[in-house]
Amino acid sequence: MPPDLWERYGARRADADAASGVHGAFHWDWYERCGPGSELLGALDGRTVVELGAGAGRQAAHLAVTRAVAEVTALDSSPSMHGRGHKAYGAIPRLRIVRADATAYLRKHPNTFDVAYSVFGAVDFSDPCQLLPAIATSLRAAGTLVFSTLGRYRNGQEPESEVRAARLPTALADGTPATMERWVLSLQVWERLLAGAGLEVVGVQTVHDAGRDQHPPMVTHIVRAVRPPGR
C-alpha cells in the first residue's frame, strides 16, 4: 500500500476546523473567506452528488445537512482522511464516506451522478487526462462538474501552459520527506482538457484574495462544466 501523504495535513486540518468552525459553511476559495458558496452547484433537490478528493468530508457533510440532496458521496483515497470523516460525519443521513481512488471509482459507476465537484481536491491531485474522462462517464446527461483550482502557484509562479504536474515537497506522518504531484494549469489548458473529455465549460469565476498576516495573495479559479445531453 502506498504511504498516506495526507495524514500529517489531515491532523492540522482537523485542528483548524475545530478552532474555526468552517465545516458550517461551504467555500471554494483558498482561504475560505470570500467568494460564492454551494449555490454554484445549482439545484440539488433529489440529486446525487459526489465530492472528489473530499478529505474528511466537511464540505460534503455541509451539503447533506443543508441541501435537499438524494445522496452525497464523499470520495477520498487517503486512509487517514477516510477515518476522520467516518468519526466526524459518519452518522449524517444521506452522506456516504467512501475510500477509493477517484478515477477508478468513477469508471466503475457510469451514469451515476448528477453533480460532481472538487475543492482543491482530486482534480488538482490526479492526472486530468485520466480523471476528467472518468468524471464525464460518471455523470448523467446534463450533469454538472464544478471545481476550484489554483490560478497560479502559491509562490506566485504562473500556471503551466501544458499538461504537466509539479512535484511538491511534503512529509509523512513521522516526518519522513516525500513528494506529491499537483496539476496547476492555465485556464486554456483546463478548457482544452475538459472539451477533450466531452465536457462543455459553461462558466468560470476567479476569486482574488490579497492575503493577510504574512499569508500570500492567492488566485482561485472556479470552473463549471456540463456533460451535454446526447454525449
Image: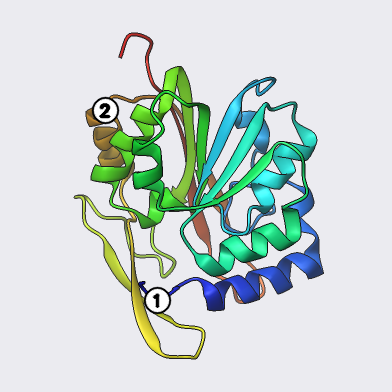
Q: Which residue is mark 1?
A: 3
Q: Residue at x 79, y 35 (%)?
A: 66
Colouring method of the image: rainbow
x and y, in percent, of residue 220 in the image = 50, 49
Task: Identify the secondary structure beneath mark 1.
Answer: loop
x and y, in percent, of residue 203 in the image = 46, 27
Is 87 situated above or below 128? Answer: below
Residue 34 visible? The answer is no
> In the rendered image, which quarter is residue 67 located in?
top right
Q: Amino acid at mark 2?
A: Ala
For the N terminus, give its image quadrant.
bottom left
Q: Which residue is mark 2?
A: 195
Of all residues, the one furthest to the bottom in this rendering is: 175
Decide which of 82, 119 is in the foreground and name it: 82
Q: Amino acid at mark 1?
A: Pro
Q: CA distance from mark 1 to mark 2?
A: 33 Å
Decide which of 118, 85 is in the foreground and name it: 85
Graded by Cα atoms within 10 Å as few (under 14), some (14 to 19) or many (20 or more), the crowding at tag 2 reads some
Decide which of 73, 231 is in the foreground and name it: 73
Q: Are marks 1 and 2 in contact (CB under 8 Å)?
A: no
Task: Identify the secondary structure beneath mark 2.
Answer: helix
Q: Residue at x 72, y 62 (%)?
A: 87
> In the rendered image, which quarter is residue 3 located in?
bottom left
x and y, in percent, of residue 197 in the image = 26, 30
Is 86 situated above or below 96? Answer: below
Decide which of 36, 81 is in the foreground and name it: 81
